[in-house]
Image (cartoon, grey):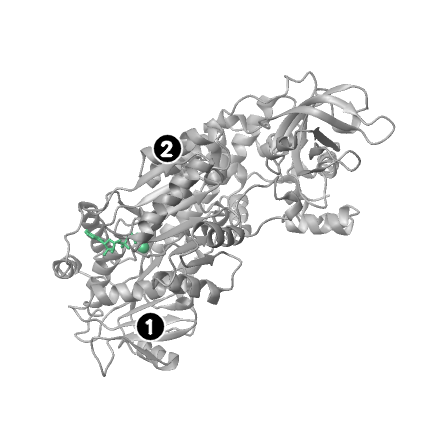
Amino acid sequence: MEPSDALEKLFRLTPPQRAALRRLGIHTVENLLRHFPSRYEAAGEESPIAGLVAGSEATIYGTIGNLDTRRSWKRRIPVGEAVIRDSSGSIKVMWFHQPYLAKKFSEGMFVKAVGAISGKGGKPYLANPHVEAADPVKSPLLSRPRAPYKEAEGALFAVYPESRGITSLWFRHAIERVMQSGALERLIDPLPDDVREKYSLPSLQSSLRAIHAPNTEAHAKAARKRFAFEEIFAINVARALERRQNDSLPSFCIKDGARLADTFTASLPFSLTAAQKRAIRDIVSDFARPHPMARLLEGDVGSGKTAVAAATSYAVVKSRPLGQDFGTLQVAYMAPTEILATQHFNSFIEFFRELPISIALITGSGCRKFPSKSSPGQATSISRAQLLKWVENGEIAMVVGTHALIQKTVRFKHLAYAIVDEQHRFGTAQRRALAKKESVAPHFLSMTATPIPRTLALTLYGDLDLSVLDELPPGRAVITTRIVKNTGEGRQEAYEKIRAELALGRQAYVICPRIEEPDPEKANALQAKSAKAEAKRLAADVFPKHRIGLLHGAMKPAEKDEAMARFADHELDILVATSVVEVGVNVPNATVILIEGAERFGLAQLHQLRGRVMRSSHPPYCFLLPETNGSASLARLRALEKSTDGFVLAEKDLETRGAGDLLGRRQWGMTDLGMEALQNIKLIRAAREEASALIERDPALSAHAALRRRLEEAGQFHAE
Ligand code: ADP
Ligand code: MG
């Protein structure tokens, strides 16, 4: 057996197992060895569910699911139901006369249950047990609360993440077979020996053994730490390589940027914040260098990133290509959606009204150009073919659009500056594509309002320099955030405020955690409000005189655009939406937002949601309505009453609930282990330092073949 052997050849797999492995990205023996357990159970400790017999008392740990309430079949008494599963099996839970107990838990929660096993003669079930949330064994690296298991006498056994079609047991057996085959010894450690020794990290072989079959928790902990380090280190090596590559490319050198940007800012109706000035200075001094800028502009919603983009774009479009005294350099501005592209096109027209610049908008639904030849104060629709021609011959200085902008069909004459707004994954492959397309690589600015903690920014954006807008323009009304108890009274109070704002001619958002009501039978167990049902209810019972619209992620793009446009044009008073409104939508007349099921969201995400009503000078309000009035969730939400700094809130998310709550985590392509490591600033720093030292010594990774292969497989290494 070799590490690179396909599992299909070595194991007899059922079709569901095959599908599950494919879904998990596990194809080879090595992939299998790198599929890590999510926790460990102590053999012979609390009862495995499979062994439970009726008539005994039991304490079990597992994940709870299938939560439901109904009336019992014979006696019509209300019953709450659930199923608890562990790696050995599952058991039904019944709460007679206490159906509400089923509502205390959410699907997939890890729990401890204590109670009597009933069901003599039939299937055993737990009757009226005491059930409470428990902490599964998490990486002790993160100094989580202790495992619920007593210290084991014998070995621990691994529990792999739940996945449809394949059991934890299958993984344990398969990995054991691989270990016995000796394939493990033939793996080469991607971590350089000197780095490993410096931080006393265990070798690849012993870490793999310890992570899959630890003797003690300490062994598992050391192994997890090693793999977390390896992942963060590899990301940093990839970023350092990218940066090095970037710094070897030629770019447009703009010497006069500072003066040009000043000309622009003098035309603004407001004066810039100190933070905006700093960011502009950072950017124009990058422009003056012969290599492309690679910079991230982080700033909370409303901090004025667009003005920074406009001032620096102005400096670019007013500059001539090198050695030429005609023509202009060009700017591409990429927004995440068509709505936002259109909004930005309009703001740039406003910004450049006094300093006319030709600007174009390219979206799937059409192209526009400003100024129009016939009526110079206006924008006009033009054909795509015409627009592409003008972009290619350099007549249009600035192009605004979605991703479509980097397609092959869009050719620039002198693309000198590319700005992307809220597109986290942009910057690696796409940036390279963009740079390759042009003979001279454009300066690159990524802008984001997504509050991410420092450790994550250092890792993910390790190849970018950073400018931060840590200050809001003056005169903004401070948002009033209120946590409203989920009672009839609390709700009425929030609705009254919404009514009062609507009476002043303002608009409101109501955010719901779900799109649709689940199966009506289960409507009680899963109480999360659905946007669809809530929109109906509000229209019928609460705001019958107002115009209510709906926006959620399952709608077609055209429907979404229409709902947003109607809200923006004030054809709607209230927009009931899911968290899809989180990114960048700008409706300044909206001044109040009510968020249902607030505890289901991370703090940083709630902060972004309330940013939707911080776009104007009217005093904004945010009401947070939790589903339950439990003190833990209320305490967490209080942070939003206290802080209006998205980055502080993101750090707090990381601290209180781990990486799971971080905004955008799905796009970042890190494993859970890597995400957990973000709580460990020392580890992050060390990985970063070692990575840049390594790239200094061996930029082609020629002496580090195993590391190079790891990066190549992740699509992160590209020979120069
Ligand atoms: P974001 O950082 O969220 O993209 P925007 O660039 O959309 O923020 O700015 C929000 C609003 O604030 C816009 O209407 C913009 O014109 C205005 N603005 C930007 N900078 C300033 C400033 N220094 N003083 C006053 N208003 C400003
Ligand atoms: Mg913006």
The reply to whether dot 1 and dot 2 touch (C-beta < 8 Å) is no
Give percent across and percent down for residue 622: 35, 43
Q: Residue at x 35, y 58 (%)?
A: 420
How crowded pointer 2 is (Cα within 10 Å; few <14, some 14-19, many 20+) is rated as some
| Location of mark 2 (residue) | 639
Nearer the observer: mark 1 or 2; the answer is 2
Amino acid on which disc 2 is placed: Ala
Q: Residue at x 34, y 64 (%)?
A: 569
The numbered mark at residue 412 is 1
Q: Quadrant of the N terminus?
A: top right
What is the CA distance from the residue labelled 1 to the residue labelled 2? 47 Å
Q: For this rendering, which residue is in front, 46 or 511?
A: 511
User: Tag 1, which secondary structure?
Assistant: loop
Q: Is residue 603 left or right of residue 74?
A: left
339, above or below 626, in the image: below
Q: Quadrant of the C terminus?
A: bottom left
Q: Is residue 207 left or right of residue 374?
A: right
